[in-house]
Image (tube, rainbow, N blue to C red):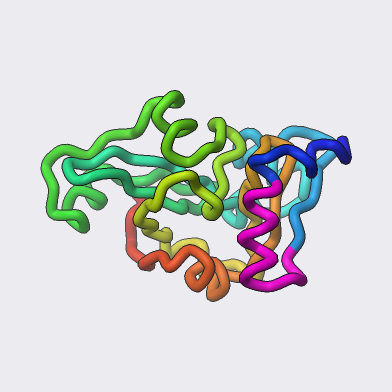
Amino acid sequence: MENILNKESVKRVQTKLNEFDKNIKVFVLSSSARTADQAAKSLKTDIGSIVKSLLFKSEDGFILCLVSGDKRCSINKLKKIKNQKDVSMADPEIVKKITGFTIGGVSPIGHLEKIGVIIDENLSRFEYIFAAAGHPNCIFKINFDNLIKITKGSVENITE
């Protein structure tokens, strides 16, 4: 399992974390955290404290939505926030191309391309939240304020 930390996608996340705060580390779970439910069970934490990183395609590019694990992203709210009529989930190939991560390991940071980030306000309910770190078995722990700072994301009500 430890060689997972040497994967390029995981190293990219750890590099971004190191640039922000050397105390935030990627760690490997013994079981998959591909879904919010799996991650919550592995960490023995509330599913809401798991960050789902969801990539959406819009008329003018891509938006990464960071959503609380117990919520669903509202495409209608996203359309209103972005003032666009056409917003949809990106398919797995596009997710990999834009972020450099496969679904189940999409991190809020360390993307191949610059992406605007919107953060679900519901994540603020937790002292610490857990996000994927470039691989389905890798995560990092961060507080809400630092998630905002490291992603330069805007906080919105994007869930239903």
Above or below, 147 relative to 15: below
Q: Where is residue 138 in the image (x, y as percent from the top left)?
A: 72, 44
Between 60 and 148, which is closer to the camera in this rendering? 60
Looking at the rendered image, the quarter that the N terminus falls into is top right
Left or right: where 120 falls relative to 11:
left
Give the total of numbered labels: 0
Between 22 and 32, which is closer to the camera in this rendering? 22
Between 46 and 6, which is closer to the camera in this rendering? 6
Q: Can you tell which quarter of the image residue 38 is in?
A: top right
Q: Is residue 156 visible?
A: yes
Secondary structure predominantly adopted by residues drawn in magenta: helix
Q: Which residue sits at x=64%, y=34%? A: 34
Q: Can you tell which quarter of the image residue 8 is in?
A: top right
Q: Can you tell which quarter of the image residue 126 is in?
A: bottom right
Q: Where is residue 118 in the image (x, y as percent from the top left)?
A: 37, 58
Q: Position of residue 137 (x, y in %)?
A: 74, 38
Above or below, 3 relative to 18: above
Residue 15 counted in the magenta span: yes
Q: Which residue sits at x=46%, y=53%? A: 66
The stretch in magenta equals: 11-24
Above or below, 143 relative to 30: below
Between 83 and 23, which is closer to the camera in this rendering? 23
Q: Position of residue 45 (x, y in %)?
A: 72, 53
Left or right: where 101 falls relative to 11:
left
Looking at the image, which residue sits at the far right?
2
Q: Can residue 38 be seen in this view?
A: no
Residue 22 counted in the magenta span: yes
Q: Which residue sits at x=21%, y=58%? A: 81
Left or right: where 70 falls relative to 113:
right
Q: Which residue sits at x=55%, y=36%? A: 101
Left or right: where 98 falls relative to 143:
left
